[in-house]
Image (cartoon, grey):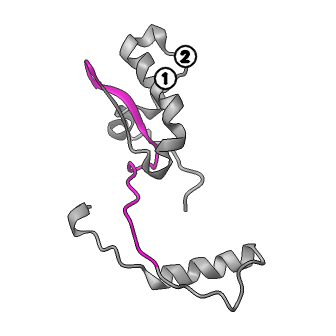
Amino acid sequence: MDPDRFDESMDVEWAVEATERADDAAAYFGPETRIRNGWAGLYAVTPDHHAILDEAVPGLVVAAGFSGHGFQHAPATGEAVADLCLGEDACEVDVSALSLDRFESGETLRERNVA
């Protein structure tokens, strides 16, 4: 996806369906609910919707692909990056499932909370 060519206009059909589904889940929405405006933005994720947290090459630690939830993961990510910089013996949490190698090996993770 080329961010410079991304269409920021709202997908009206998607917005209507999302509003109808919200109506099914919450009494707040109903027949009088109107979509006043909207826009679209990139949801920058990896192919399996999970972050990359790995030493890509010696001396280069990558922490990327968090999309909108990176902010909430920042404290733990910072600690994991520091551990990776200090070496394997320093790692308190096993982040190997978030390695770059998973894309080559086909052992990607399954995102259970995004349709």
Range drawn in magenta: 38-60
Rendered residue at 41%/24% (across/down): 81
Tag 2: amino acid: Glu
Describe residue 20's horizontal placement relative to residue 90 as left or right.
right
Q: Quadrant of the N terminus?
A: bottom left
- Along the polypeptide, which appears first: circle 1 or circle 2? 1
- Residue drawn at x 39%, y 11% is 87
Amino acid carrying mark 1 in the image: Glu
SS category of the residue bearing label 2: loop
- The residue drawn where x is 57% and y is 81% is 17
Q: Where is residue 38 drawn, in percent x and y? A: 46, 78
Residue 76 is a magenta residue? no
Q: Where, by quadrant of the figure, is residue 100 drawn?
A: top left
Quadrant of the image for the C terminus? bottom right
Determine crowd level at label 2: few under 14, some 14-19, many 20+ residues with C-alpha closer than 10 A: few
Task: Find out whether the residues at labels 1 and 2 contact each other: C-beta distance under 8 Å.
Answer: yes
- List x then y, in percent, for residue 46: 38, 48
Circle 1 sits on which residue? Answer: 79
Residue 106 to residue 32: above or below: above
Q: Residue under circle 2? A: 92
Q: Is residue 22 depicted above or below 67 in this figure?
A: below
User: Horizontal and vertical percent for residue 13?
Assistant: 48, 85
